[in-house]
Amino acid sequence: MPEMLGSDLLLEVHSLFPKIKTILLTGYSEIEEISKSIKAGISAYITKPWNEDHLLSEIQSAYNLDILEDEKRIAEEMLMEELRWGGELQKTLLKRDLPKTENIEFDVLYQPLPALFCGGDYYDIIPLQNNQYLVLLGDVAGHGLKAAFITTILKTIIFNDYVRSRIGKSFSPADFLEWLNKRIAHELTQFPDMLITFSAILIDIDQLRLTYSNAGQSHFFIIRGDKYYPVHQEGICLNISEDSSYKNHIIRLKEKDHIILLTDGLIEIEKDRNTVSPEKTGEILCECSKNNDKLPVVVSRFKDLCHIETFQDDVTLLSIRLKL
């Protein structure tokens, strides 16, 4: 090879065809040659004179490695396809036409981890009777298919086994959470470490009253004019104890109030192992509310604040704006 060294050839081959397995058979042993060979991703480095059996063994090893990499690639493609399918199914299951009325405006943004397509956030907005709406937000521990499967269980049992029979009747968020906790403890007997945070909020437009009960969820916010009011929620997560009890809390609303619920994926700063403070969160939400920003804009503001391109957890935002 009068024009280039073997290591230079391998570098060129690697840049053009990175999947090709290469072996360098050489009489040189300089550090520079070894360094180039490593950069070229060679399967083996053999110096002259060589042993034929050794060379054949290295060729066989490179061949076997190529087969394993192909099998790994195929398995990864199948997994990604399953995750995409799971994500589409979850979107279909969670999707519900938002109630439309002159007195209240609802909006939802649901964003699972991009690499997993599906996640553990659960939300729902259900009309119960004239001008009464049940707003639900939950967060299953973990990510991906396992968490998404639990949200599917929640979607199936909450409306069919509890809420449906109470449409048009009085509704207690605390009673609902106690029922849901017992039911989840039964459904997830084999998974005692699978914890779920959950908020249940009943909004009565006629009475301008918000009744909420909480199972481990973080703050939600009421934006009123130029001020924000973080509502700290107490209550134990679902699936910790079957006998957990929950309380109702009442907030008097005012005309034009803007209520915003969020899961903690929006405010987690993974690299700092910290979260955005309720004060800073409230400031951003208040400003976005005043500007009538859409929820994707709100999400972008938090990304800019945390200096990140993608979140490290599922993100859900629920917006409830009174228009009285």
Image (spheres, helix red, strand yellow):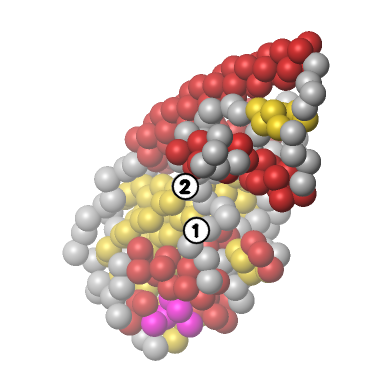
Residue in view at x 63 percent, y 17 percent:
63
Distance of mark 2 from mark 1, alpha carbons? 8 Å
Q: Which residues are magenta?
A: 283-287
Position of 233 relative to 13 (above/below): below
Disc 1 designates what residue? 310
Residue in view at x 60 percent, y 73 percent:
276
Disc 2 designates what residue? 114
Residue in view at x 44 percent, y 86 percent:
227
Position of 107 relative to 67 (above/below): below
Residue flagged by tag 1: what amino acid is it? Thr
Q: Position of residue 19 (x, y in %)?
A: 52, 30
For the residues labelled 2 and 1, say whether their Cβ atoms are less than 8 Å apart: yes
Which quadrant holds the N terminus? top right
The secondary structure type at the circle numbered 2 is loop
Q: Position of residue 88 (x, y in %)?
A: 38, 34
Q: Residues within 10 Å of mark 2 (few under 14, many from 20)?
A: some
Q: Is residue 54 left or right of residue 219?
A: right
* Camera-nearest residue between 113 and 58: 58
